[in-house]
Amino acid sequence: MKNILVCVVLLVAVSKLCFAQDSESPSAAPEWFIQEIATLTAGSGRWIADNSDYKSEQEPFEAYGTEWIASFDGTTISGRLFGIKDGKETVNFWEFRQYWHPGRGEAVIEQFGWGGTVGVGVAWRDGEETRSDQTFFTPGGNVSRTGHVSRFSDGDMHITESFDIEDDVWRPRRTYTWHRAMAVEK
């Protein structure tokens, strides 16, 4: 019985050493990733961006909104993008999931939209900015690449720029300034 107890204690100790992850481990999420999740999800987790520069008959939204929720002790994030028309929230246009992939050592972004469109890609830190590169697939067989660059001005405002990526050239599309919003009753 004493030998079994010693073996169990050794097995537990060895497994803790083998599976322990610290901030220096290549498979652990880096601090920039954890901090970005914390900033996006703080307070209501809601952000609103004015759309007056792009509003049209085909795009009647005065603003867009995102809502972010952290999961698993702040190491993953899920979210949604919706429009605001006549002061009211529309249906979701996109749903997002972002997580740190420990096997690949990178941030993975998955995006799901109307009609079955799916975007998958990665994000990385470049100085004070976060960049992402996603490939989008439609059920009809169309494939395209989109890039984003985001940076925080402060804890309550961040700016995103979107790009079409063709032949590895990033062509600017839109820029939005997002402001932290108060929670709304649902």
Image: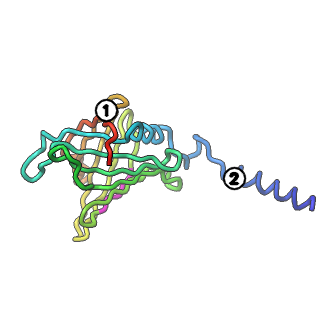
The residue positioned 82% from the left and 58% from the top of the image is 8
Q: Residue at x 36, y 50 (%)?
A: 79
Residue beneath the point at 19% across and 42% down: 63
Q: Regarding mark 2 in the picture, which secondary structure is present there?
A: helix
Residue at numbered disc 1: 157
Whole-percent x and y of residue 165?
24, 51
The circle drawn on residue 18 is 2
| The residue stretch that appears in magenta | 118-122
Residue shown at the point (40%, 44%) measured from the top left? 124
Q: If the image is split into quadrants, where does the N terminus sit?
A: bottom right
Number of marks drawn: 2
Which residue is most to the left? 57
Question: What number is the disc on residue 174?
Answer: none
Question: Magenta includes 38?
Answer: no
Around disc 1, counting alpha carbons within 10 Å, would you say few (fewer than 14), some (14 to 19), or many (20 or more)? some
Give the image location of residue 169, x and y in percent: 23, 48
Mark 2–mark 1 distance (CA, rounded to whole Å)? 41 Å
Point out residue 45 in the picture as x, y percentages from the top left corner: 37, 41
Q: Are marks 2 and 1 in contact (CB under 8 Å)?
A: no
Of residue 118 and residue 171, the one placed in the foreground of this image is 118
